[in-house]
Image (cartoon, rainbow, N blue to C red):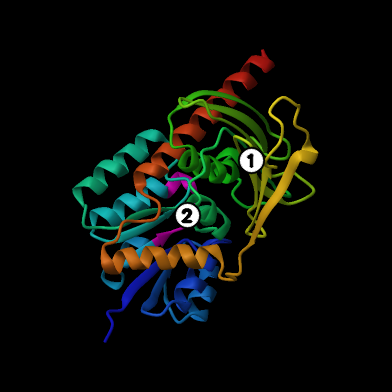
Amino acid sequence: MENIIRVGVIGAGSLGQHHARNYAAIPGVKLTCIADVNEKAKEIADKYGAEFFTDYTKILDKVDAVSIVVPTTYHYKVAKFFLENGINVLLEKPMTATLKEAQALLLLHKKHKNLVFQVGHIERFNDAIKKMQEMKKIPILIEASRLGPFTARSLDVSVVLDLMIHDIDIILKLVNSKVKKIDAVGVPVLSKSTDMASVRLEFANGAVANVTASRVSPRRLRKIRVFENNAYMSIDYVRQSIKMYKVAENLSSDRQISWSDMTFLESYPLENDEENLAKELKSFINSVKTGAKTAVTALEAFEALKVVLEIENQIAKKSRKMKV
């Protein structure tokens, strides 16, 4: 009989309840418990046949792995507790609220190398992104936009840590070069923290990325365009689709090229209807079962955090100057 992986979900809010729902549907996984300070989360536990706790420290003998889906300020404390007690951890992004906390978790994981420690950068599991990575493109310019309407969700962090970090993680993976320069601006609109931000990243290999994120947009848009010599790709995160364009062949080298010379080369509508979160959790469980390397390493999550915290730092400095 296959070994059953016992899983708990810490935090059953707007995202945590979807972790619970997906774990309950994965073969070989038993959702044993849900922990949340809000007693209303007991309804979610009851729905999936799991025990309910208001104190996450009481579930150690009931789990082999946990998803930590609590506010960012508690990421370090909760992840530290489970890693120190021999439990595999999937920690929602951002990794932590500070670099110091993230470094401490990296060091702790080194002491517990037998444990799986994965950070939830969910766009890594988007089929469009996976397809693009398979093509091994060499980006020269990247443009990313992630816009959405205002909600009360995740207001404990800015739009940079909430939304932009997804694109920063993907861009770091695609470019695979050190960030040389960051120029960022941002503004609070409907909350006390940054609700809209724009950043330009310059990399050591010469690549450039322009990234925009907003949680006060009337429309929902999640796209990234990747330009290379004589070609570019347009990726729609929501539709999980790719369109590729390339300069037509056999053009005279001495004439100016226009848009009409661009040829629609190929489209990749991806058929997988499975939600990205389900793919992420299955990948995590596979690493727990087999010891396979996680799809997103803790070090990669740390690098993404380092960039977004510098973006936040720049925005804060510019904001202070404007107030003077």
Measured along the vertical axis of the image, is residue 278 above or below residue 163?
A: below
Q: Nearer the viewer, residue 177 or 238?
A: 177
- Residue 90 position in % (x across, y down): 39, 58
Q: Image quadrant of residue 195?
A: top right
Instruction: Indicate whether residue 253 is drawn in magenta.
Output: no
The answer to whether residue 54 is visible is no
- Which region is colored magenta? 67-74
Residue that numbered label 1 is attached to: 231
Residue 70, which numbered label?
2
Quarter holding the N terminus is bottom left
- Within-10-Å neighbours for mark 1: few <14, some 14–19, many 20+: some
Which residue appears at 65% of the width and 33% of the height?
197
**Depth order, front residue of 8/281:** 281
The foreground one among 10 and 185 is 185
Marked residue nearer the N-terminal end (1 or 2): 2
| Amino acid marked by disc 2 | Val
